[in-house]
Image: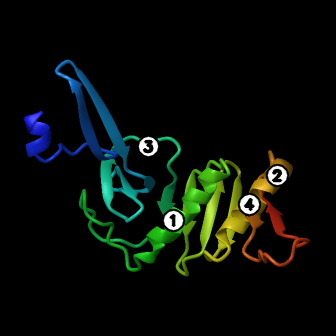
Amino acid sequence: YGKDRLREHMQIPFVEDYNLVFHSPFDVEVIVHEKSVVGYVSYMSSYMYFDKDGIIVESTNEEVEGIPRIMGLSYGQIVLHKSLPVEDQKVFREILDLTQVLTRHELGVERIQFDSRGDATLHMENLEVFLGDSSNIAGKILRLSNMLPELEGLNGILYLDTYDPTNSNMAFTFKRKS
């Protein structure tokens, strides 16, 4: 009890904080607050996982299922528990928004690739989805979610960068890969 109240809590990977609630000398409840890990980058043969603020929360040699690999970011030296050193910090907000919408629609994405302009491409099995910039991201992902049954088993690139929320009859380009 004294250690919990007087000392700083031990750092645990993927855990923001925890509380110990003592109900009796023999009954303790542990409440865990998880960090929201939004992605990871590969760095020096390790996977560096970061949270919504771009803080590196874990370094491991194993990939954690369900967390997308983020590619195309330019960064310098990575230090555990420090922010990922990228040129434009707003990219973390875009990654967070994108991963939250993907989670809401239960879409599994293996990789998110950013190009030099900051345009995003999702990689899902044999399908690539070019989203373009971060405008109307929720609408683009909703449209993708609705289109996925038709795209099942296809191999190619779907271009959603021309999405317009005011046009409900919009057609999108799909280019097959061989």
Residue at horizontal 37%, vertical 64%?
Answer: 54
Regarding mark 1 in the picture, which secondary structure is present there? helix
- Tell me the CA gap for discs 1 and 2: 24 Å
Residue identified by numbered label 4: 142
Percent coordinates x, y for residue 5 in the rendering: 12, 42
User: Which residue is the site of mark 1?
Assistant: 95
Label 2–label 4 contact, CB within 8 A: no
Q: Residues within 10 Å of mark 2 (few under 14, many from 20)?
A: some
Q: State which tag comes first along the sequence, 2 or 4.
A: 4
84 left or right of 63 in image: left
Does label 4 or label 1 sit earlier along the sequence?
1
Quarter of the picture holding the N terminus: top left
Q: Earlier in the sequence, mark 1 or mark 3?
A: 3
Are the two marked residues, 4 and 1, in contact with CB atoms closer than 8 angstroms?
A: no
- Type of the residue with mark 3: Glu
**Spatial distance from mark 3 to mark 2, Cα to Cα?**
27 Å
Which residue is denoted by mark 2 in the rendering?
151
Q: Which numbered circle lies on residue 63?
A: 3
Which amino acid, by three-letter code, is at mark 1? Ile
The one of 143 and 77 positioned closer to us in this rendering: 143
Q: Depth check: give the residue in front, 28 or 44.
A: 28
Give how far apart the Cα atoms at labels 3 and 4 are. 27 Å
Cβ atoms at labels 1 and 2 below 8 Å apart: no
Q: CA distance from mark 2 to mark 4?
A: 14 Å
Of labels 3 and 2, earlier in sequence is 3
Task: Describe residue 107's horizontal placement relative to residue 172 as left or right.
Answer: left
In the rendered image, which quarter contains the C terminus?
bottom right
Camera-near label (3 vs 4) is 4
